[in-house]
Amino acid sequence: MSAALLEARGVSKEFPNGTRALRDVSLTVDDGTIHGLVGANGAGKSTLFTIIAGAIPPTAGSLRWRGEEVSWTAPGDSRAAGVATIHQHIPLVPTLTVLENVYLGELSGLYRRAPLMERYEQLCERLGYRADPGRIVEELPLGERQMVAVAQALATGASLVCMDEPTASMAQAEVEVLFDAVRRLRSDGMSFVFCSHFLDQVLELTDTVTVLRDGEVVATEDTAGLDEDALVDAMVGRTLHQMEDERATPLAPDAPVLVNARDLRSPGRLDGIDLTVRSGEIVGVAGILGSGRSELLEALFGADSRCSGEVTVRGEVVPHDVRARMAAGFAFVPENRVRQGLVPSWEIWRNVSLPDLATLSRRGVLPDHAAEIDRASAAITELGIRTPSADTPVTSLSGGNAQKVVFAKWLFGGSCVYLLDEPTVGVDVGAKADILRLVRDFAAQGNGVVIVSSGLEELLAVAHRILVMRAGRVVAERATTDTDEPELLALASGLTTVTGASRP
């Protein structure tokens, strides 16, 4: 029986904004094994990786490394112990060579190439793969960069490599090369934690799988005893045949077309997207990380300068420009509300009035403070924002109330199309219900909504149709009355077998 290499015992993590990312999580990785880690977006996988890497401390619980309790306070601590973490966005220096990246921690001023080359050749023999040591990393295809990252981890003497979505943008041939290397290193005694949304790859590669849901471990099983349906069931948290109880009110059959987007393309982001939104319709967008969901919203909002294609609102072509799209009625609620949706140091009233200052100014020049306060006060009442006053800085609000302020920015400005990117992420159950009610009410007034969410149950409850994206393309479309969470998850994950609700 393998010995425990890493143990997480009762690990919990609560962030200052009140978000509980992990709840009493326990995980054991044995020597010479590949341990799978799966869960929907927001399940807590990346948070757990970050704690194991020593980048953030747990709120409660402990880590044990080779049987001894450890308290890593910085990434350097875990690296020194023998833990390497490879993120989806590969942390290599693009302007350096392969050799320099592999031995990055050993470079200081002028270095001797010959000794490094000798070690590099030995390392490549162990890895079973050799990248040209003299090539600049930014010239390499993505799959080869991922192999360089594995070589870098190997060069540090790592005993455990945590891989976060390593195959998200890799071609199948590149995936096979990576998997061959991982299996070869496992037979040599190394251990891996493999985190991926591609469930077929998890089932193919790993020895054991742990499933996280809403920050908790809901299953840890030998992979050999699992099939696709069982894994999806654990992630979704309900049986395959169970449907969501709540669905959107059926759309009027004669509802006019509000938005028509044709052949939206952006290099490396979108590959020919067609989208129609009718008056009163809520269109959900599902997909795994890197599928192009957020990129689609940015293209519709005019924020992607490289995007081509045509967008019309009520039959009129709207130029590819943020100001033109806003004037046509588009409103964008981004996933990262702090960086993109709010000015954190400003009060509620200033954030709420920001998109519509011309209307709230005397002669369109001098801000009308009283009018701004009135609008913010109306938004606080209408949206149920919990705050002492409109003068409260948004940094003092909870995640749910801060998100309501983002909605309030667009509430009174004549918007007719909401583009919502993970609108309920990081908010509590009560705030989530309030936000979904806002979405339904907005659409019920004859407006249109395009909503991206990792919470498939949310999309099923609020949307009329759901588009499933992979690799910048729409790969499936389902009416919410004809699908369920397991089917959507399977479609988004690229599983070969789809089991779920009846489909046309």
Image (cartoon, grey):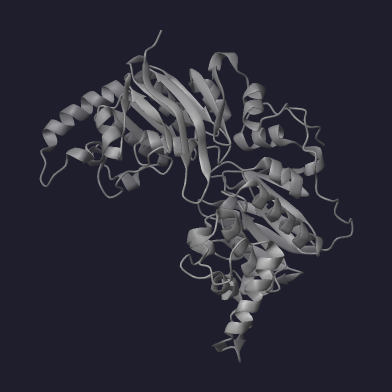
The residue located at (21%, 39%) in the rendering is 105
Q: Position of residue 129 (x, y in %)?
A: 33, 27
Relative height, residue 482 to residue 391 (above, below): above
Residue 124 in the image, given as x and y percentages of width and height: 27, 26
Question: Residue at image x 57%, y 26%?
Answer: 200
Q: Quadrant of the N terminus?
A: top left
- Residue 22 to residue 35: above or below: below
Q: Looking at this view, name the residue that lies furthest to the bottom.
A: 363
Dividing the picture into quadrants, the one containing residue 232 is top right
Q: Is residue 419 left or right of residue 154?
A: right
Residue 75, given in percent of the width and then of the height, sits at 30, 39
Residue placed farthest to the front in the image? 388
The outermost residue toward the top is: 1
Decide if residue 170 is in sight here.
no
Relative placement, left or right, of 79 versus 433 is left
Residue at the spot x=89%, y=59% of the render?
254
Between 422 and 111, the residue placed more toward the observer is 422
Nearer-the-camera pick, 303 or 416: 416
Up/down of 479 relative to 446, above or below: above
- Residue 392 image position (x, y, % from top left): 53, 68
Q: Which quarter of the rendering shows the C terminus?
A: top right
Q: Who is closer to the viewer here, 351 or 201?
A: 351
375 left or right, relative to 501: left
* Residue 12 visible to an observer of this rendering: yes
* Occupied quadrant, residue 32: top left
